[in-house]
Amino acid sequence: MLWNKKDNTVINKLEEFETYKLNNREIFIDNISVGLANMIDGQIRVWNLLDDAIAVQDREPIKIYINCDNGTLPTITTILDAIKMSKTPVYTFNTGVVGMAALFVYLAGHKRYCYPMGVFHFDPTDFDLTPYDLNPTDSQFYTMKDCLSVIHNELKRMLIEKTDIEETQLNKHMSHSWYISTEDAVKLRICNEICRKHFKLEREER
């Protein structure tokens, strides 16, 4: 049972909750799949179309709440491009654990928030292209390894540009997983702000 702040009624049906999330521009990620990536892309496009006549600074932001430690890097490219192309601000929230490919969805947010006890997980072995080495029977023309190398290089660039993690530091610690607390994530500029209460953006704060 939830309270609908817009008309002070109780939300007690799943369909009503889905409508509530759409009206409040909220997306939840707990498991990344192609279907979810397509849904997020569609919703971001629709909200941008609805906002077309509204100045960017006056638009209601899209909120993506993430508690996910999975996903493959190629799967998230749709989400990353959708966020990047969105004129309507997209805010991302770590509500528990954000790791693996989901970390890059989080980093794509125009503003990034985290619950006080949130954890960030980065596994550099995701960038290991060894499993995609050519077999003797493989074609030498535009291989899977070539394609993934482009994606991996772009994600590395994104990680370095959006945080205070230096390339030398990244290269030095590529053999083990990293687990980063909320406080350390703020120091590294992975997270912009720690949530001290549930998010509510008043118009005068925009």
Image (cartoon, rainbow, N blue to C red):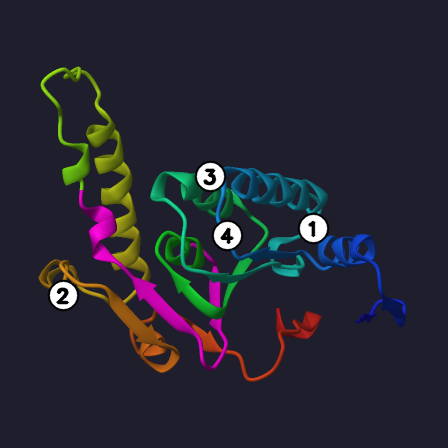
Kindly indicate whether the residue at mark 2 contacts the one at mark 4 (C-beta within 8 angstroms).
Answer: no
**Three-letter code for the amino acid on which mark 4 is drawn:** Asn
**Three-letter code for the amino acid on which mark 3 is drawn:** Thr
What residue is disc 3 on? 78
Secondary structure, mark 1, is loop
Question: In front: 101, or 92?
Answer: 101
**Three-letter code for the amino acid on which mark 1 is drawn:** Ile
Residue 195: x and y in percent read: 53, 79
Task: Judge the density around disc 2: few (<14), some (14-19), many (≥20) Cα neighbours within 10 Å.
Answer: few
The residue under the point 82% across, 56% down is 16
Question: In front: 71, or 4?
Answer: 71
Task: Judge the density around disc 4: few (<14), some (14-19), many (≥20) Cα neighbours within 10 Å.
Answer: few
What residue is disc 2 on? 169
Secondary structure, mark 3, is helix
C-alpha gap between disc 1 and disc 4: 32 Å
The residue under the point 35% across, 44% down is 73
Marking on residue 31: 4
Q: Which mark is nearer the camera, 1 or 4?
A: 4
Q: Is residue 30 left or right of residue 139?
A: right
Q: In this view, does 146 lie to the left or right of 50?
A: left
**Residue 114 falls inside the magenta stretch:** yes
Marking on residue 54: 1
Instruction: Give the magenta-colored segment's residue range.
Output: 107-128
Secondary structure, mark 2, is helix
Specify which label sits upstream in the sequence, 4 or 3.
4
